[in-house]
Image (cartoon, rainbow, N blue to C red):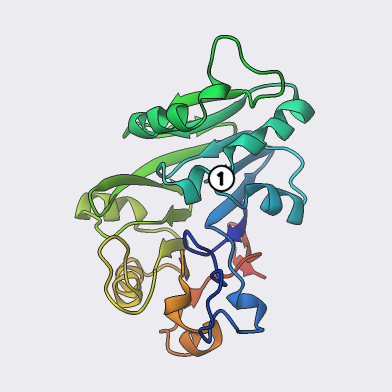
Amino acid sequence: MEIVILGTGTSQGVPVIACECRTCRSPDPHDKRLRTSAWIRQGGTSIVIDAGPDFRQQMIRHGVRSLDAVLITHAHKDHTGGLDDVRAFNWVQRRPMDIYARESDRQAIMREFPYAFGKNKYPGAPDIRLREIDRSPFRIGEMLLTPIEAMHRDMPVVGFRMGDFSYLTDANALEAEQLEKMKGSRVVVINALRQEKHHSHFSLSEAVDILQLLRPEWGFLTHISHQMGPSREVGGTLPPGVFLAYDGLKINLNPSQVEVV
């Protein structure tokens, strides 16, 4: 399994427009964060988790030529705002794009992109085939995916486990039953917004506590805001095996080892 972390930023990205904080002014490329997303490949199957406003830029930046599906964690715009751009894949692949989402998120997508679902669609509109996620594991090509349910304040969100890789973002509450689904993962990616407690996201210490409970070989933090502080400084405070993810991080998950670039 090959994983590319396409974006690690919050809804505003980093740097934030017009912000003069130390993080936003940092020249370190690790402090340049597009909206949170990940690209996973296994065998001949290629999927992306979330398609925010930076989706087009992320696809071009990493040379994504084929895509079987987009998984939606929840319907906030920083995770769905780029869905219009799946029409490029419609053209190249000559088929609809499968979008996997919970029923409430499916309804939100249809409200936000009505021109993609009308009876008399505008020529060139994205061709989207919505597929529902429930609590059951499901397959996309060669991948078996297990949904991980969590809460984003009062909004349900869904993460995913694929083999030895677990991914969860935009959560601030996770029940023991769902945490159990992530145990044994060799690589875990989880959100950590900032160092201070937040009403709808895990803080740095909360996310680190979860990773230390799960004890993966590699634990990465994503959905990071400029309030976290410069990555070089924050990274030096983290316990062994826990790291701030960054845009373009590549993980090769092999049976014998995990390679991180």
Viewer-proximal residue, 63 or 181? 63
Viewer-proximal residue, 108 or 30? 108
According to the picture, the residue beneath numbered tag 1 turns out to be 51
Residue 89 at x, y = what percent?
72, 33
Residue 165 at x, y = what percent?
48, 55
- The answer to whether residue 163 of the structure is visible from this angle is no
- The answer to whether residue 57 of the structure is visible from this angle is yes
Mark 1, secondary structure of its residue: loop
Is 38 positioned to the left or the right of 124 in the image? left
Is 214 positioned to the left or the right of 5 in the image? left
Identify the residue at horizontal 42%, vertical 46% (top origin).
76
Residue 133 at x, y = what percent?
39, 31
For the image, the number of numbered tags is: 1
Kindly indicate the quadrant of the structure image that contains residue 143. top right
Identify the residue at horizontal 58%, vertical 25% (top origin).
128
Identify the residue at horizontal 50%, vertical 62% (top origin).
12
Residue 208 at x, y = what percent?
35, 74
